[in-house]
Image: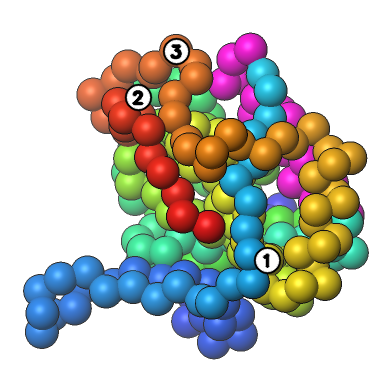
Amino acid sequence: MLNLIDREKCLKKYKQFPVTWWNEKTEELDSFYPETYGGFVLTIPAQSFRGLTGKIGNELSNLAQILNTDSLIFLRAYDKPWRFQKSDYGPAIKALKYLKDNGVKSGFNGAIEVKKTELVNFGIHLAWMVRSVAALTEINFIDPHQNILASLCQYGNLHLYTMNKKTHLMLEKFVQKSNFEYLSENVCQERFRLISSSSNKQPTKYPVTLKL
């Protein structure tokens, strides 16, 4: 089972999580993002997105291992439930069912702590959720010691930020030994066949440049 954490309790304990909210006074979205030491945009070679998902799960487990932690904690930036939107796309249906089967109720909007032993399986479903469920954007994750802040984008790339020099140097060595590769020019773009469903999120048709 996944360990579910109340949203307010999570944000009180883990203050490095990015959050986005609606400002009623300005009638605009406001957001918070913590100051970071440095970052990487990482990709994994694969022939298909389906083939990529299993590799993502493995590398998340390896990342937890190198960080000497038994779990990673995932939280949506937006104050919306994880199962807020349904999908008619096969892998997305399985991913949302996975959440339901693991105790994530329809109104749950808090954090999900995932043990290292479950990260391989969770990573597969996370990748499909981010890619094909429009409402599930900006799912960030940290380690319990808050040495990193990371997220998967819809293209299957890992956006990994470090909070201190020691962790940054350690992760540079980790990347060299992992299946990850540094993304050329830090530009995320589609490299697999696009999914097609009226309820699915379509990848941006132009490259998205990400500032580190």
The image shows residue 200 at horizontal and vertical percentages of 32, 29
Q: Nearer the viewer, residue 176 or 105?
A: 176
The three-letter code of the residue at mark 3 reads Arg
The location of residue 132, given as percent across then percent down, is 41, 31
Q: Is residue 206 left or right of residue 46?
A: left
- In whole angstroms, how far apart are the C-alphas of marks 1 and 3? 32 Å
Q: Quadrant of residue 204?
A: top left
Label at residue 193: 3
Q: What amino acid type is highlighted by mark number 2?
A: Asp
Q: How is the image coloured?
A: rainbow
**Foreground residue among 98 and 74:** 74
* Helix, strand or loop at mark 2: loop
What residue is drawn where x is 73% and y is 30%?
Answer: 55
Q: Secondary structure at mark 1?
A: strand
Q: Nearer the viewer, residue 129 or 5?
A: 129
Disc ID at residue 162: 1
Circle nearer the viewer, 2 or 1: 1
Q: Which residues are magenta?
A: 47-65
Which residue, given by chain and number where applicable, does mark 2 sit on? 88
